[in-house]
Image: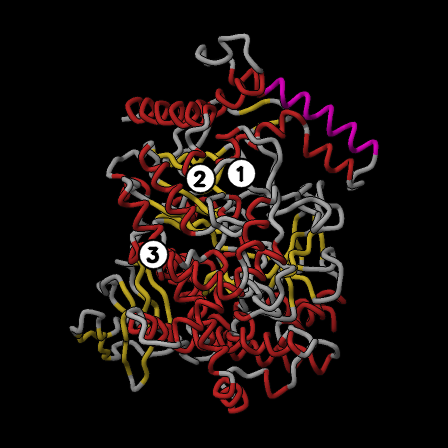
Amino acid sequence: MSQTALHALAQLAGIAVDWTDANGRHQRVTDDVLRKVLAGLGHAADSEQDISASLDELTQLREGHRLPPLLTADYGQSVALDRYFKPGTPCQVHLEDGSTLDLRLDDHAGLPGMIPVGYQDVRADGRHFTLAVAPKRCYSVADAVGNDPARAWGLSAQLYSLRREGDGGFGDTQALESLVRSAGERGADALAISPMHAMCTADNTRYSPYSPSSRLFLNSLYAAPGSILGERAVRAAIDAAGLGQTLQHLEALPLIDWPAAATAKQQLLRSLYDGFVSGEHPLNNDFSSFRHAGGEALENHCRFEALQAERARTGESLDWRQWPTEWHDPRSPTIARFAREHAEEVGFHAFCQWLVDRCLTRAQAAARSAGMRIGLVADLAVGADGAGSQAWSFQDELLSELTVGAPPDILNRSGQGWGISAFSPEGLIRNGFRAFIEMLRANFAHAGGLRIDHVMGLQRLWVIPVGVPPSDGAYLHYPIDDMLRLLTLESHRHQAIVLGEDLGTVPDGLREKLAARHMLGMRVLLFEQTHTGHFKPILDWPDDALATSTTHDLPTLNGWWRARDIDWNHKLELINHDTEQQWRVTREQERRGLRHLLANDPQNFRSEGDEIEQMIDASVRFLGHTRAPLVLLPLDDALGIEEQANLPGTIDSHPNWRRRYSAPVTTLLDDTDAARRLELLACARQQAQERDR
């Protein structure tokens, strides 16, 4: 009886007791794991009394008549309100444009489907809620480029890898401006970049862009302050801080030294801030306006940064969950007093956010001015550090006691723990999806598109209790229809496309839901095989997904052909001898299969030149001829680079997130190979457009 009640509680909380693994085998979550996951969700389940009390609480929440602060709807569809109101109840809808609709619920207590798209305030029977009405579909690539079907193309790049003179050791927004201008001149419509989320400023040893402190704010290290404050001010700040030789040394390194480069950049930013606040700077009003518009969310983030700086100064834990209890609540009088006492430090972090915000605005403007019809495509990480700013600021909406990962599969027999936290499904509903909406708006703000990493997370995530192995987790389900409507609405409002990274084990029906709303999935050349070595022909590629050659977590085309990923796994002893040999046999079959596919085009392999160079050229041409509305060519493949950006399963044994391009960004696309491949892609896209009209 106890197990039955436990399973009922888990299912009511959105936990999948039973699931199917990557091999198609049925799996069941153990009772011990269920109890730990339930505890992470805030539902005690250690005893029968706990389970009974938690069941009663959740049942009342699910079946009660408590009106949530926000409901979602599709435009033109009636909204069932029978759980909250009686049929015929009169109501007023206060629209965003200031007008009012006087309506009456129908015989089924439904709100007529005549409410305009937007966030509308509904009042009935002395209560009110926000109705988020979504358009039927997102802003699409066809909308952006003015062609249907769309056959657009662009590049993808790791921002930190870009190089320019005076960058201080890693790429920044000034280098990004140069790249978008070069790409736009060559006909690209989009440039997808690695995440720019805010990191933990007090700990420069952590730099994976997919493990941020907050997805609401930006990594201020990427700011190019000379773009906003002028190069003279930057030179003066460098001299005042004595950073000249340090920055030159860092800039000359073949790999990014993140701890040293980040420390130097922060010293530069502090020197600039000192000069900025010491006098009447002409941009003071703009900074003040930015800070005012940022409101509580920005203030909380800056206070958190100041709190972490204080903890770092005293050598104490940066994890807010280990701070004194009175520091846990962002709205407490203790935190307000700390902010007053450390106003200069809080102001410094606001200054940094202002700088990078204005810099990124310039980069998107440069992209559009260069002819890009989409421009920047931002990257939204699947979660944030449970010890970070976002988790502290939105404690009721994020699960700080559960981390996100992946269950065991063929490639990762122990599963994966990503060390990041995710939204609380119940917390989102309880708070009107506030944190989710604010996050979407922050990431759409400076971009013409948004790539959602691990888009399956909108439907379910593998959550793992803190301190246990990834295998001891469970799938947690999310209110996907609500989240897709909100995503569609924000895409529409920002006139920005949506790309969903749907690689791996995808829940049944998810791709169909995405396609119905014109959210593009993702197809990677190296994965598009019906079985080993049998690659899909062009006409089998879908028209509802972007096409690309590889990703940051996979080998480049050059590296894949040379089996550099296998070499690295062998070198780091991540695989045994038998696995390595089987992998190499499989890779040879795949190489033959890809060459056979590409050889079907008579334009390919026509000379006696280097086979790898010709393979990359042929792959670029192939992708260009697919029916994908958008093709994104990784800059690494355009250049023919051998090493990959990130090797999953490693932290510091492989130089993850540290590689830089050898040439400055101003001449990067003039590289012979890159120039040729961009021309190949542009021509293939034009031919595909003409073919599919």
Q: Are marks 2 and 1 in contact (CB under 8 Å)?
A: yes
Q: Are marks 2 and 3 in contact (CB under 8 Å)?
A: no
What kind of secondary structure does the magenta stretch mostly adopt? Answer: helix
Task: Tell me the kind of residue under disc 1.
Answer: Tyr
Q: Relative to residue 253, is residue 150 drawn left or right?
A: left
| In the foreground, 554 or 405 | 554
| Label number found at residue 285 | none
Task: Tell me the kind of residue under disc 3.
Answer: Thr
Residue 209 is at least partly visible in this image: no
| In the foreground, 60 or 334 | 334
Disc 1 secondary structure class: loop
Q: Position of residue 290 (x, y in %)?
A: 34, 71
In the image, the segment drawn in magenta is 577-593
Query: Looking at the image, is 136 positioned above or below residue 142?
Result: below
- Crowd class of label 2 (few under 14; some 14 to 19; many from 20; radius 10 Å): many
Q: Nearer the viewer, mark 2 or mark 3?
A: 2
- Crowd class of label 3 (few under 14; some 14 to 19; many from 20; radius 10 Å): some
Residue located at (34% from left, 79% from top): 85
Residue located at (43% from left, 80% from top): 65
Disc 1 and disc 3: Cα gap in Å? 24 Å
Residue occupied by mark 2 = 665
Q: Position of residue 193 (x, y in %)?
A: 46, 47
Q: Relative to residue 364, is residue 194 drawn left or right?
A: right
Examine the structure image and report whether residue 580 is included in the region drawn in magenta.
yes
Give the image's coloring scheme.
secondary structure
Residue occupied by mark 1 = 661
Disc 3 secondary structure class: helix
Residue occupied by mark 3 = 361
Disc 2 and disc 3: Cα gap in Å? 19 Å
- Crowd class of label 1 (few under 14; some 14 to 19; many from 20; radius 10 Å): many
